[in-house]
């Protein structure tokens, strides 16, 4: 029996509701496999914790999380707490504190999921974004001077280190080698305007490409990428993007695969020195919170990514199949998919299908 310790941080808003469904699927999967077991420890960190304690997480939070095998996070953000406080106090703190330098975000249209592009089929939308996850504009370097005076000035400095940039480019090339598609990496840049950071980024991309001559490469400016996502998504395989660009293009990617209710992600510490963290791409959706109407598929897909990270050669594709069956059947769908099912009913339906597929 292999045992794994999972830290669960449901967070705020719909984070709580979708996390419950993710854990349900994890437990069902483990029970069906028989030889794996997950021990969970729940942490009540988030905006309500902040309003009570003045901190988004325990001040020793990173120390507490360090020895877990993985972290499962719901979402962070609450209307009465400024977003930069809540996100820098929890989500970004973990990404950066645990050097989770790659944020892996698959964009894949499942059969039965609604694609806003009418002439595109599931086989046309199947690519993955390797988002740099600890540097760039998110490095937290900057400041405000002359506050509230006419001279007031704000600086937010983007940071790009050779070591980290090389590492994530290398990861992207290796991923393209493993994937069964075009063996292609698209470099997402903006070096026409950003004459230091993105010129440096492109230079490292070109250097790394030399080590992967079997991989096709192309470089697209990020503004053009947003257009090509709509016009020719089928031409993409692996994209490598800086932190901010990766953030923006993956919400657009989410739309291509049916909405934020489908977008999953893994924040990976490549050195395995610290735990990696898995979370849906969406936020706490205050407009939906507490109503059991959020789509849990993004979280369930996220759990699949967590399993792929922890286990080798496991039947996790069955989870995707279970989701696909539900989409094609069309009876147990949340309101974003024009259904009337509750969040927990979708989780139950996925577990029921899993039992049939794996039982
Ligand atoms: P959001 O992702 O919470 O919501 C954007 C839109 O998508 C909303 O209309 C919402 O109803 C819909 N949506 C999101 N998830 C859904 C789901 N599972 N099923 C159905 N519909 C879904 O983004 P936002 O509104 O920009 O931000 C809300 C809060 O969440 C803010 O505080 C923001 O900072 C935070 N946020 C957190 C994360 C995170 O924790 N990873 C990510 C993004 C935003
Ligand atoms: C995401 C989110 C976060 C990000 C925010 C909430 C800080 O948008 O995970 O995509 O920008 O990385
Ligand atoms: Mn985002």
Image (tube, rainbow, N blue to C red):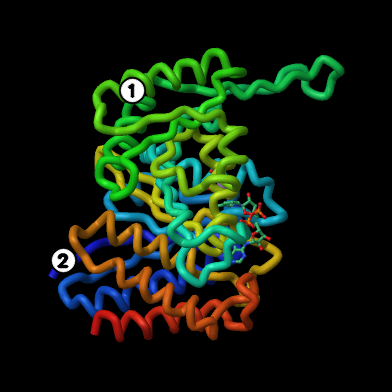
Q: In the image as oriented, which residue stretches furthest toward the front?
A: 119
Q: Secondary structure at mark 1?
A: helix
Say if residue 226 shows up in the picture: yes
In this rendering, the answer to whether 95 lies above or below 296 is: above
**Which residue lies under the disc numbered 2?**
2
For the N terminus, the image quarter is bottom left
Q: In the image as oriented, which residue stretches furthest toward the right?
A: 150
Counting labels gives 2
The residue positioned 27% from the left and 61% from the top of the image is 5
Q: Which mark is residue 262?
A: none
Instruction: Report the side of 251 relative to 280 (left or right).
Output: right
The residue positioned 68% from the left and 46% from the top of the image is 82
For the C terminus, the image quarter is bottom left
Say if residue 139 shows up in the picture: no
The residue positioned 46% from the left and 65% from the top of the image is 110
Report the Cα–Cα distance between label 2 and label 1.
Answer: 34 Å
**Which residue lies under the disc numbered 1?**
163
How many residues crowd mark 1 within 10 Å: few (<14), some (14–19), many (20+)? few
329 or 16: nearer the eye?
329
Label 1 CB sits under 8 Å from any ligand 2 atom: no
The picture quadrant where one finds residue 190 is top right
Coordinates of residue 31 in the picture (x, y in percent): 25, 79
Q: Secondary structure at mark 2?
A: strand
Query: Which mark is in front, 2 or 1?
Result: 1
The residue positioned 43% from the left and 53% from the top of the image is 126
Q: Earlier in the sequence, mark 2 or mark 1?
A: 2
In this rendering, the answer to whether 329 lies above or below 90 is: below
Coordinates of residue 88 in the picture (x, y in percent): 55, 41
């Amino acid at each position: 029996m292999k045992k794994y310790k999972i830290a669960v941080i449901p967070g705020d808003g719909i984070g709580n509701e979708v996390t419950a469904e993710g854990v349900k699927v994890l437990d069902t999967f483990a029970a069906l496999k028989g030889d794996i077991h997950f021990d969970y420890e729940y942490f009540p960190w988030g905006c309500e914790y902040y309003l009570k304690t003045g901190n988004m997480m325990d001040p020793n939070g990173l120390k507490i999380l360090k020895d877990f095998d993985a972290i499962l996070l719901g979402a962070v953000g609450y209307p009465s707490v400024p977003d930069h406080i809540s996100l820098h106090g929890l989500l970004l703190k973990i990404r950066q504190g645990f050097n989770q330098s790659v944020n892996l975000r698959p964009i894949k249209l499942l059969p039965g999921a609604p694609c806003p592009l009418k002439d595109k089929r599931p086989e046309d939308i199947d690519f993955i974004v390797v988002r740099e996850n600890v540097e760039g504009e998110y490095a937290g370097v900057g400041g405000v001077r002359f506050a509230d005076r006419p001279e007031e000035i704000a600086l937010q400095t983007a940071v790009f280190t050779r070591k980290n940039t090389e590492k994530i480019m290398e990861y992207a090339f290796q991923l393209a080698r493993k994937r069964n598609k075009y063996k292609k990496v698209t470099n997402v840049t903006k070096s026409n305007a950003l004459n230091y950071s993105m010129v440096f980024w492109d230079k490292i991309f070109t250097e790394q490409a030399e080590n992967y001559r079997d991989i096709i490469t192309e470089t697209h400016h990020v503004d053009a990428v947003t257009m090509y996502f709509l016009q020719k998504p089928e031409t993409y395989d692996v994209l490598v993007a800086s932190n901010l660009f990766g953030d923006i293009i993956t919400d657009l990617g989410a739309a291509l695969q049916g909405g934020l209710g489908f977008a999953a992600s893994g924040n990976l510490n490549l050195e395995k020195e610290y735990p990696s963290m898995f979370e849906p791409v969406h936020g706490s959706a205050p407009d939906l919170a507490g109503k059991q109407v959020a789509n849990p598929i993004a979280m369930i897909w996220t759990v699949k990514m967590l399993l792929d990270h922890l286990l080798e050669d496991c039947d996790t594709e069955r989870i995707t199949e279970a989701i696909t069956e539900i989409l094609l059947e069309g009876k147990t769908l949340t309101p974003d998919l024009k259904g009337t099912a509750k969040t927990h009913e979708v989780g139950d339906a996925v577990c029921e299908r899993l039992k049939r597929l794996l039982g």
